[in-house]
Amino acid sequence: MSPAEALRSELLRAIRDNLRDGASELARRALDALARYAEAPKGSLDDRKAALLAFADELGALRPSMVAIPNLVSRWRDAVRDFEGAPEALGPFARTQAQAVRTWADGARDATVRASLAQLEGAQRILTHSISSTVLDVLKRLPPARTEVIVTESRPGREGWELGATLAAQGLSVSYITDAQGGLFIAQADAILVGADALLADGTVVNKAGTYLLALAAKDQNVPFWVCAESFKCTTTPAHAFALEERSGSELGPPPVPGLKARNLYFEMTPPRLITGWLSNEPLAPRFAPKGA
Amino acid sequence: MSPAEALRSELLRAIRDNLRDGASELARRALDALARYAEAPKGSLDDRKAALLAFADELGALRPSMVAIPNLVSRWRDAVRDFEGAPEALGPFARTQAQAVRTWADGARDATVRASLAQLEGAQRILTHSISSTVLDVLKRLPPARTEVIVTESRPGREGWELGATLAAQGLSVSYITDAQGGLFIAQADAILVGADALLADGTVVNKAGTYLLALAAKDQNVPFWVCAESFKCTTTPAHAFALEERSGSELGPPPVPGLKARNLYFEMTPPRLITGWLSNEPLAPRFAPKGA
């Protein structure tokens, strides 16, 4: 295997096997991977372009439920495809382009955090589910002395374990609960705030399994349910064509008996009728306009 | 400590610390405890009666969310209180009485199972949550070759682990899922069947945390949500006065950091508007009448 091929395999594996981070963070890591790989291919301009674009396509297909990855990669891809110049100039151009898209994505996250903070002003008890780097950034900027966060465990990965520890270290009060207790604790929350792995064109939110149950309970108890997500989470793929990742059932530690199969669907869809509003860096399609709490 | 006192402490501790069994099974064990303690107190008839009745009261108060215990104990208590005869005849009478109440409770369970089987005829995929000895008896009597059971993990105790293993050993197909995936798998179920720790007078069902979320999802997706419970689970205590057990947060294995508190409410209430029907050994109050799926 050539050094370029080895690097390519290593970069793809790191994204594919990362079950810790949410879609935003993984999409950033995909851009970092594009920057690292940019100068590896050699040969004619066409050879180099073909290698870079193929790598981008592979990155974009790694985590089908996380549309942020193909969306950000595609911003980079268009510029690289249209590049004209000396073959040896393509690599530096592609690297700089990846860094530029990452800078844009960072700005989108910051604007999403600001929009979320403005919406949550005055909320003292916030319930969240799973882990989202955008939600974490929002919660870390709330006044710690008067903010309580209710964090679900989020089985099987228990992303809530790390999120709860991080928030408590920042001085916030954290209540750590099983996913099954979500309906019991929603009554105590001023708002629910979750991230998203994808936003479908009809406003449906793709997020970690368990999100739909919390949205149902929030609606039932008149607690506002907010989704914060950068605009690069949007996709035109309709719900019926959207692929939801299933991971190995062994992550549940099931009874090892014949006739029993552990299922491990990571993501699920929450329909727009259960969502109070979408908080983002830029106005989304009209159907995403907040309806008020 | 006298032998009678030692026995009394041992019997109470066994019920208090049993987190494995549901309300029906624990209520049976309380009757067995009454039978075992019946002949321990000595002295005058009044002394013996006072000791037996005090023990019954303690048993009845051990697990506040499980009304089956005080309900069955109280059937025994009334007979013992009204006993007239020789002091030494009280013990054998109380023991026989405990056995008679247990026999009646067993009959009530069998009738509840029959009513549930009649209702579920034709259902091929059934989703259940937590563990209930009555639900287990129902599922074990369904035709194993054409029945699939979707079993939730039921954190933190993971009662679903044992239930799933037991059902698979009986030849049923079992899908084992996290509590968070309940909303994803309800669409595949023909019916939801859960037990109950208590039935309040307005039809509210007290059961393991997570039941309310599943009932919301079942309603949202038009899947019938059945509760099977013997009539001795009924209580006249209203919802606002009903005590829901909270156990130690350490059962969740939370991050050991200051500022973070793990919460562990075992039970929650599911309102009657989310319940398709109550399956029981005898007609319950009119408000429990099945509304049809």
Image (cartoon, coloured by chain):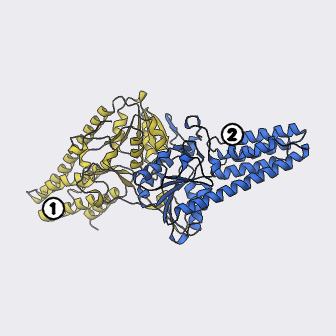
Chain colours: A blue, B yellow
**Residue B34 appears left or right of A76:** left
Image coordinates of residue A118 in percent, x first then y, are: 56, 63
Foreground mark, 1 or 2, reads: 2
- Is label 2 in a helix, a strand or a loop? helix
- Distance CA(mark 1)–CA(mark 2): 75 Å
Number of residues whose C-alpha sits closer than 10 Å to that of mark 2, classed few (under 14), some (14–19) or many (20 or more): some
Task: Please tell me in which quadrant of the rendered image residue B146 appears.
Answer: top left
The outermost residue toward the left is B85
Do labels 1 and 2 touch, CB within 8 Å?
A: no
Residue A142 makes an appearance in the image: yes
The type of residue carrying mark 2 is Ala
Q: Say which chain tag 1 marks.
A: B
Identify the residue position indicated by label 2 in the image.
A61
Give the position of the N terminus of chain A as an image quadrant: top right
Q: Say which chain tag 2 marks.
A: A
Name the foreground residue: A74 vs A242: A74
Residue A254, compared with residue A120, is above or below; it is above
Image coordinates of residue A9 in percent, x first then y, are: 77, 42
Image coordinates of residue A74 in percent, x first then y, are: 72, 43
**Residue A135 appears left or right of B85:** right
- Is label 1 in a helix, a strand or a loop? helix
Image coordinates of residue B169 in percent, x first then y, are: 44, 35
Residue B258, compared with residue B21, is above or below; it is below
Name the foreground residue: B126 vs A196: A196
Name the foreground residue: A35 vs B51: A35
Q: Can marks 1 and 2 be said to lie on one chain?
A: no
Name the foreground residue: A268 vs B61: A268
Per the rendering, the mark at residue B49 is: 1
Residue A1 makes an appearance in the image: no
The type of residue carrying mark 1 is Lys
